[in-house]
Structure formats: structure tokens, C-alpha cells
Amino acid sequence: MHTAVVEVEQSDERDSRSTQDVLGEYGLPEHAPVEQLEALIRVAAALCGTASAVVNLLDGCFQHQVGAVGLQAGRSDVGDSMCAVSLGCPELRYTPDASLETGFRHNPWVDGRRAAVRLYASAPLLLPDGRVLGTLCVFDVVPGTIDQVRRAALADLAAQAVVLIEHAREARAAQAQALLFRIVAESPSDVLSWHRADGVVLWVSPSVRSVLGRDPASLVGRRSDVVHPDDRLLLEGVLDDVLAGVARQVTVRQQHADGSWRWMEQLLSPMTGQDGDLQVHCVTRDVTGRVEAEAALRETAAQLEVARDEALRRGALLEAVLDTIGVGVVACDADGHLTMFNRASREFHGLVEDPTLDPSQWTDRYALFDADGTTPLAPERIPLVRALADGRISEADIVIAPAGRPAHLVRCDGRALRDDDGRLLGAVVAQRDETAARAAVGALRASEQRFRAAFSDGPAPMAHLDGDGRLVDVNAALRRFVSHTSGRLVGRQLAELVLDADAARLQRALDGGGTRAEPVEVRVVRSDGTAVWCELACSRTTGADGVDHLLVQLVDVHARKLSELALQRAARQDPLTGASNREGLSDRLAELLDPASPDASPVALLFVDLDHFKRVNDEAGHEAGDLVLQAVAGRLRAAVRPGDCVARLGGDEFVVVVTGRAVAAVEQLRDRLPSLLAAPILVAGISHRVGASVGLAHGRVGDHPAAVLARADAAMYAHKRRRAGLTQTSPRTLPVQGSRVPLSP
């Protein structure tokens, strides 16, 4: 949280930049899961018995407090931060009285300028790759102690904080991925397509017109013949890998409709169709310009080699050191003179590098021993000497045991550094502290045992159920979550706390307990009647009585679930009129006509095609045309019941789906719609009129949605002919999906 005076070195500056970069990578502090972290912070303060606790995220300039207990969260200068000393350190920092430590005594958070911190403990927020996000710290204004067990638990809570931050990042990534797919599908520069395993095209996006000048309909239903003959064998080999379950990327030439050949980069991925058949998903992009540019770059690459050689010689040593930041790093020059100890290495040895020493003096000066910890290390076995002589070492274990300091078992990997001409520059060795790693494994096992025993005080809502799904025991977190006392919960069925609509999912989770089934999402009803989306996980345990019980854990996913549902609704809605779009219409018809659907019902379809709408666009402009379409959609919604569906297929075509008892009266609605829609529509003071041709078709349960829609379309055209006095018209093929599975090229 708050720092003592720290010596500033180049490695510290690089740590600051690295920390700032990792905060940006995780969207912190802006997208921190504050509510979840605050719950965890409260547990940390209660666990350690301190008045205050906080999660600090540290970058090169500021300390960001994203959650706090006992103080007002905010932002402060990292130069005043006590917790900044935890950056790059994998161990917990603890002091009973900060005012007695030289490093903290004059810190603003200790000497009274900001606060008067005494008892202090700080656990780093370590990512799996060793990078540090910040710290979880607890503190108080009076001296005190925190025993080893609670300090270990504090470190475990810091690890849980990292898990919360990782989950928040993954949720944002999932939302971004869904948005990215929509952007790519609508992009004029990328062509999306789906193919059967035999290569037959099932669907291709409309962008194929702008990329290859081809009509999508000309490609669907047959194998593609646009690939250059010289590239077909390569593409077939790639398809074999994809059908074996491996996503592949390939660049091939494809023929444009104008006869020219274009370089196309294709990303092919395996996917499973609705019927369980193996299919191929393909994203194609025109990279002709890039391929030609790469060819030009290759021609000039030789001219850059001479200038690059000198830059590589200057940067080789620095690059190797930067690659090993985060562990102990030592380096020497070609003559065996020490040139660098990084911070971790100085902590191992308790000394800085001495460039005046001969390698034969290193063993005594830096207390180097064989892996047994007692035999002094022979000079020729020192990892840095071996790397300089042999060119490379791997997993060489030694012990560093300075007098009066803890011994460290370190595993060393290193290599000699040479320039492009083979001249020896020196050597670098990375020292990984295996002592801490082995201790961490033991601590993790102990932590798991503690948390299994800490059911009652766990931060996550949990409950024990008997074999009938009845609540046997609940922890405090669950009681708080549902706002019930233990007496009002124990003995009740868990299903009583879940909405009836989610009962089937809950039962599947209970039936699958112990089989590693995926968690299910259900809505839990609190005492005030509010329903909260939760992720429910269930596992089978054996109690002390030898009887099997079910352990249920809840995670609040209400905000994420609401966002998902909003995205699903937006994907099925026409953005201009607010009516359902083609996909929404397809889903609704499939639900109503599928015999296995609980919503199965006969339907009546009214296919509405506007007359004279093009004249509105031509005379008043597309903005006026959009307003007319919005008015038409509003009139259609007003003319039907709330449960009926109004959809816009695109352009000036609408479909109304009528269900239930209203089906019998749909002919009256059909006859009434033309006059209803013919009423003047006032836009910017100008009155516009459009006509409407309306076709009616009935659908029974079991009918194919596309067939019903085609009959309504044909009836609409018959109506249009009667109104226009025409005697014949050419049939057309409606671009309507025949199933609920989206098709693409």
C-alpha cells in the first residue's frame, strides 16, 4: 500500500513500465470487479483482525485503491506507497509495527502526514506468468501481530483476488468477441462462409460481391472452383488438418469474376453443424496488397542487414536480460567480470556484483554450494562460468547460503552471448528460486485443507444438501446473499429458493453432482422477492457420518447475465424499426411450428410489401424513408396483440405472425391493413402515402417455416397483381433460412 524510500535503478523503471502495461492489458483500474473485491477485502480485514484493508493496483505513477475497508478509496502518488515494495517480490510483506522499521519509519503513511500505520501486512497480486498487478494489504493504527496461519490465508485471498480480476477480464473478452463476430460478418472486406466436409458451400456472406465480384447464390450448393490450380493441393492438405480438428490458416490465389487472380488469406476452423455433422467455417480476406508489399520488402531486406547488425550487437545483452526479468539474473562479460546482479539476485546473495573479482573468488564471496547445501561449489561448476565456457546450461541446481541469511535452492538456466559474427560478448544466467516454489506447493495443500474446513466463514455462498435436495447446513455468505436466517433455510428444499422456470436446470445440476458437470445458471429469490442470476456448481462430498451430501456453491453473475440477454435481444431486432429482424422471425417461427416446442401453435402469416415506397426515398430522401418505415412498423404493432410478432425482412417488406385465438380473425386484419397503412404519414411537415400488398398464409405445427413464408409471399404477389391489374409475374426465391442454424460462405 504505502512505501518506504526505495533506491531507483533501471530495473525498477522497467518494473514500473511493465506494471503499467499489465494494468492496461487487464483494463485496470477502470474495469476492476470492485463489488467482488470489496467482499474479499472485508474477509481479509476480518481474518487478520485489522481496522483497514485495501486492494492496491500499482503503475509507474499512481497507486489505485479499487476497494477498501476502513478508509476512503482513491488514488495516490506511487512514490508514497508502502505496497510498492511488493512489486516483483513473490512473498508476503509483514511488520507488527511499521514505525520501528527503517524502511517505513519516515513514510507519509506511517509518520502522520497521511496516516499513522503500525500493524501492516501486504500480499502481492501475482499473475500466473509472474507479473504483479498490485497488492492486497491489511493494516491498523495500533501495533499488533498476525500469526503465520492468517498470513498464509491472506496470501491465498490475494490469489483469489487475481482470479476475480482474471474472470472479469474473460467476461469482457467474451463480450468483445461477440461484437467482433458481428463486425466481421457485416464487413465488406471479409468473406465468411460455411462448408460441408466434402467442400460444398452452405452459406457465403454478401461481401463476396465486393471481394471477388461474385453473387453468393452462384457459390452456394456446390464445391468452389475459384482456387488457382497450383494452390489446390495445398488447400486440400489444410482441409484435411481442419477436418481432423485443427484450425489452420492458409494463403491461396482465387479468381475474381473479372478473371484476375487475387491473393486470399483464409482462416479455416472445424465446427459441428446442427445435425452433428462436421463442417468448416472460413474467414477470407483479400491480402493481395500485403503479399505484393511483402515481396517488395524481401527485395530490400538485404540492404538493411548491415545497419541491423550493429544494432543487434548493442542490444543482444540488454534483450537477454529483459527476457529474464522477474527472477534472479546475473551476467558477466567475455573476460569473466561480473556486470549485473538484478534485485532478486542481490536479495539471494545479500551483496551486489563486484566486477573486480576473479571467477575463482565467486564461491567464497557469494556463498555458493552444491545442491546438497554443504559442499562448496567448484569454480568450474559455477553456472555463469559453465555458460561462458559451454555456451548453454539448463536446470543446474545450486544453493546460495550467505552467513546470517536464509539459504536458497535455485535452479539456473543460462547461455553465452555472441554477436552475428560469433564474437563472444559474455553470458547471462537466470536463477529461479525453487525453495519458494516448493514451499508454495506445501502452502497450497495446507490452504486447500483450511478452505475445505472453513465452510462456515467462506466468502462464497455455499450449502450442504442431503440426498433429497434439502438444505442441511448453510454458511453465513449464503444467509447474507438471500437475506434469511439459518433457521428459515435449514430443512427447506433448495428448489424453494429458485424460480420455477429454472427448476429443471437446478435438478439437472443436483442429479449430476460429482460427475464434474458444468455449472448451471439459475435465478435465486431473495427474501425481498428479487431474483438474482447465479452460477450454481454442485459436487458430491462424504460427511463425517459416511453419508453422501451435496455441496452447492453460488456465484453472483446477475450483471453479466443481463448483459448477455440484452445482446441476444439486440441480435434479433431490426435497429431501424425496433421490429424483429430476419433471424428473430426465423427463431419465432421455428418455436411455433416445432412439434417438440412447448410454445408449438398454429400460426397465420401476413406478408406485407409496401407500394410506392421507392418514390418516398427518391423524392424526400432516405432519412424520410426511414421515418416512414418506422411509422409503418408502429402501425403494424398497434394493429396486433402484444404476443404477436412484427418483423422486418429488409427494405420495405414486413411479416406479421399471429397466433392463438387471433388466427381465426386474421382475414379481417388482412383486409384492414391496406387502408390502415395507406393513411398519410407526416414527415417534416410533408405528407407521404404508401400502399400495401398483403398476403395471408396459415401454418400448422410441423410445417416448415420457409414453406409457410413462401405461401404468404405468393399470396402477397397475387394481391399485388389484382391491385395493379397484372395477369402474371415471375416467381422468386425468398432468402429465408430453412432452419434455425445460421448459414454462411
Image (cartoon, rainbow, N blue to C red):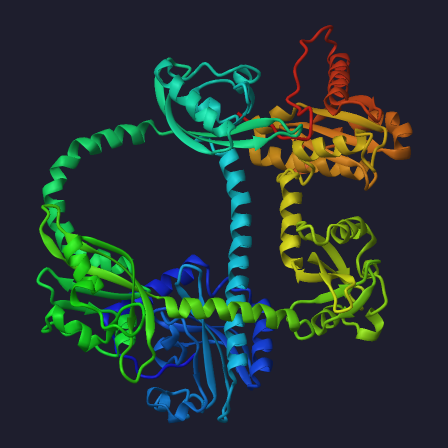
Residue 432 percent across, percent down from the top left? 33, 64
Q: Vertically, is 259 above or below 355?
A: above
Using the image as rendered, state which of residue 107 and residue 126 is in the foreground.
Answer: 126
Using the image as rendered, state which of residue 7 and residue 641 is in the foreground.
Answer: 7
Which quadrant does the N terminus fall into? bottom left
- The furthest residue to the top: 727
Asked if residue 215 lies left or right of residue 521, the reply is left
Using the image as rendered, state which of residue 740 and residue 387 is in the foreground.
Answer: 387
Report if residue 192 is visible in the image. Answer: no
Residue 203 percent across, percent down from the top left? 56, 24
Instruction: Tell me where residue 171 sits by quadrant.
Output: bottom right
Instruction: Tell me where residue 494 sits by quadrant.
Output: bottom right
Query: Which residue is painted at 89% across and 33% down in the image?
Result: 662
Instruction: Tell me where residue 723 sits by quadrant.
Output: top right
Asked if residue 15 lies left or right of residue 559, the reply is left
Query: Which residue is painted at 37% across and 16% down in the image?
Result: 228
Total tally of numbered discs in the picture:
0
Residue 28 percent across, percent down from the top left? 46, 63
Residue 437 percent across, percent down from the top left? 42, 66
Report if residue 214 is visible in the image. Answer: yes
